[in-house]
Every structure is written in C-alpha cells, then in structure tokens.
Amino acid sequence: MTSKHRFGLLLWRTPVGILGGLLSSLAMPRENIWPLIFVSVALILIAVRGLRFFPAAGVGFLAGLAFYLSQIEWLSLYLGPVPWIALSVMEGAIFAVGTGVIALVWSFLNSRISGALAPTLTALAVSTIWTAREWVSINLPYGGFPWSRVAQALSDSFLSQLAYFVGISGLTFVSVFITVIFLQAFESGFSAIRFQLPGLLATTVILAVAAIFVVPTQAEAGVLTVGAVQGNANAGLFANAERGTFLRNHVEATALLDNHPLRNQLDVIVWPENASDLNPQNNQLAKLQVDSIVEKYQVPLIFGAITESGDELFNSSLYYTVDGGEVDQYDKKRPVPFAEYVPDRDFWYQLAPDLIGLVSRGYSFGTRDGIFELEGNRLGVLICFEIAIDQIGRELVSDGAQIILSQTNNADFGRSDETFQQAALARLRAIETGRTVVNISTVGVSVIFLPNGTIASELPIFEPGVMVETLPLRTSLTPAIVIGPAFDLLVNVLALFLLVAAMGFNLARRSKSRLE
C-alpha cells in the first residue's frame, strides 16, 4: 500500500472516529440518548479496523480526545480549560493504545480464524480489549479517572439490569460485544452471521428484561428510615462563603423534616460531603449545632466535614449519635488527583505552577473502613467520586454494608452534566451491589436508588430539600460482586494474551517474508 493511499484512508477514517467520539456525549446523562453509545463505539471501530497499530492509534487518539472532551467539559468550570484538556489528552493517549491493539488483534484474527464462529470470536476479542482499556483508564495513573465508561451511558436503559449479573465492567463488555456483532452482520449483509445473531440478541434481551423482574429488592435484614438533606450550599473547593454558611444551610434545610409524615420514624439523618465547613472536632459552635440536630430528632447524624490529624488533612464523613457524640469517622480513601491533592507536586509544579498552586494543601488517603454500625445494622459510606470506583464499592459489600450512603458535593460543577453522570454511576452501583444507594448532594442531583435501580425519591437541583424513605437492608451478594474481581483479572489477562499473540504472528510473518 502506497503512502498516498494510506493517507487517503486516514482522510476519511479520522473524521469518522472523531464523530464517534463526539456522539458518545449525547448518549451520556443528561442527554440520555443511550442507543447512540452503540453508534459511537461502532464508528470508532470502523475508523481503526484494518489499520496497522500506529495509524490506528493515531486515529484512536483523536477519537478518544473527542470522546473525553465532549463528555467532561464540566471539568473546566472551576479550574479553567487546562485540566480539562490535560485530562482528555492523557485519557486519549490510553484510548489510542487500546484502539491500536484492537486494530492489530482484529487483523490477526481475520487472518487466522474462519467459519461460522469467527464473527463471535472476533466480537469477544474486541470486547475484551475495549473493557481492558477501560479498566486501565479508570485505575491508572494516580488511581485513574473512573468516568466515561460505555456502561455509564446505559444507566437509564433496560440493559442496565445486566449489571446485577456482570457488574459495570461486564455491562461495557456486553455492549461492545453487541456492537461488534451487529457491525459485522451489517457489513456482511447479515449472511455470515445469520445463524448466531438471533440467538445472541435474544439471549441478551431476555437476560436484561428478566433481570427487571428477577433482581430482588425486598428487605433481608429489616428496614431503615433515612432522612437525606440537601442544603443547597455553595460548597465549592474555592468558595468564599462566610465561615459556617454550609453548616447553617444544612441545619436550616433539616428543619424541613419537621412536617414530614415519617418524621417520627426516622432512624438516621444523612447530610452530604462538605455539609459542614466547620469541623465539630475542634469548633465548639459547630459541635453545638450538630448536637442540637441529634438531640432534636433523637437519631444519629452522618455528615461530611474536613478534619485534621496532626499534619494531615482528610475529607471525612463523621458519625454522631444521641448517646455518644462522635462515634465513628470515615476518611475518603481516594482523593481526586489535581483537585484534592497533587501527586508528584514538584514535577507538575514546574509545568503548571499557577494551576498546581491553587491546590495549596492536599488531602491524605484515608485508611479507615467505610462501615458505620447502627443498632446492629451496617451502613456503608462513600464520598463523592468513590461511587465510581469498583474496588471501594465491592469492599463495602464484602465488609457487610447493607445499604450505601453516597455523600457528594457537586457545587463546583454548576448545572452541568457532571452531577447527572455521577447519579448514573450511583444507579449502576445500586444494581451491581444489590444495595439501596442514597446519593445525597449539597446541591443535587440527590436521589435514592433501590437495589434494582428504581428511583425511590429525588430532589430538584439547587434547592434545599429532604428525602425520607423507609429502605430495605440487604445482605446477600449479587453475581456481579462475586465474579467482579475475577472478571477484571480475566479480561486483562486475555487482552494481554491477544496482544502478544498478534505481535508474535506479525513478527513471524515479517521474518518469513524477509527470508523469502
């Protein structure tokens, strides 16, 4: 193939890949045109299939850049365009490697396998590599960026119920598999795969629809009446509100519980992350206000505050009870890099001193477990982006969490898509873990998801409000929780195996051609 012909191929492939990347943002919440995620993935695959590794990686980088830039523009709202672009470039680079490997392996499989099962095996291979690439993106580097997953776009679709069986990563795998199967079927005029397509499609739809009726939501360990309070506090990282404003907003919003029909049945009150801008551990005024809430309602209060221990700073969730005052504390295990702390500060400061200087003091990594005990029940606590991290959610359930309280602060992102995207992950986490998820925010989206993802209660954004619901406590493990870690390991090992096999085949072929 001449260089001119290769350039001609890239001339149409590049815009197709970029279009695929851009369309992904319309599939994500809040636009929620979820079928477009299949179109997005298909266009990206069409753009790179048949190319060698480096051309495919080049097209994939631009597609990945469009994929991330279009989905996370909200990141620029409080720190400007630099972190938005920088994160998108980094994720685009990982995306590029993934698409390069997909192109390499796809070409290898086309030359090595044939027959009726070839389309299915190809779809399995491409799905494996895409899911493995997604795993790298959400875990590396510095803990990764647990966002912009294919499954995230499907939170409001009937396919979301598959997360009960296969988890969030598994839902991505199934979605990409469906895309590749249909792509191959369409290109072959549905002839090469006519026997497999109906069965594969029917199996997927039947499992997803059945899950809507099969996924259990009934209580297994009693119920808990939760009062979740959205204080509508401008609790941004760089907010200049008068000290005590966040706390006052939540105290005032909590008064809305007084006239609620379930007011006297409350078991616990939950405020969001950063609900108190004063630390009651060392501020007497804040402690008096917290104690007054606990005494008035005669139930424990769980809320977010910034705490200190020696020279360390933590983003914490504090647990106050009627009898004991503060009885427990959870510190965020995974602070957000370049927002809540700066990894390798000296290095990055040389590149962007003004930006790095904004994060003057970083939060430390918490080591406490996220379980709060309440009269024999175990409440699991997550803080903000931790709802998106598979490992932490799995650990909570393994530690016995019967319900998940996800405390978050979305004030920095205004009325952007960020809070809706986060709520989508909370819904998928509820289905995956089989636990009710109380997603309570300072400004919204605040919503309670039952174990099958059904909305039990929600609040309008940027308004003070309360949600009060009697919620099921569950102890059983979902199939997704049982197989999740093994699935991730298997996908990554298989992806590596496919890459090595394809590289080995290419090297052998080149050596043979030289000898001839």
Image: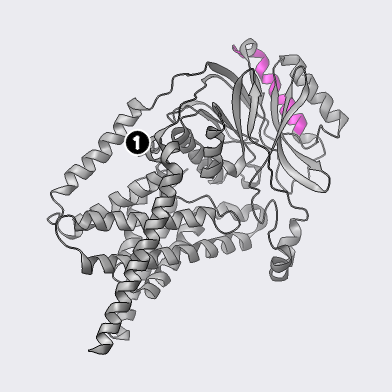
Tell me if residue 480 comes above or below residue 12 in the rendering: above
Q: Residues within 10 Å of mark 1 (few under 14, many from 20)?
A: some
Tell me if residue 383 comes above or below residue 357 in the rendering: above
Name the secondary structure under disc 1: helix
Is residue 36 visible in the rendered image? The answer is no
Locate residue 392, reporting x and y percent. Answer: 56, 41
Tell me if residue 56 comes above or below residue 300 in the rendering: below
Q: Nearer the viewer, residue 223 or 7?
A: 223
Q: Nearer the viewer, residue 319 or 409?
A: 319
Residue stretch rendered in magenta on the structure? 247-262
Q: Is residue 58 left or right of residue 75?
A: left
Q: Is residue 510 left or right of residue 437?
A: left
- Residue 503 is a magenta residue: no
Q: Is residue 383 left or right of residue 210?
A: right
Q: Which residue is mark 1?
A: 158
Locate residue 337, reporting x and y percent. Answer: 65, 54
Q: Is residue 482 left or right of residue 280?
A: left
For the C terminus, which image quadrant? bottom left
- Residue 260 is a magenta residue: yes
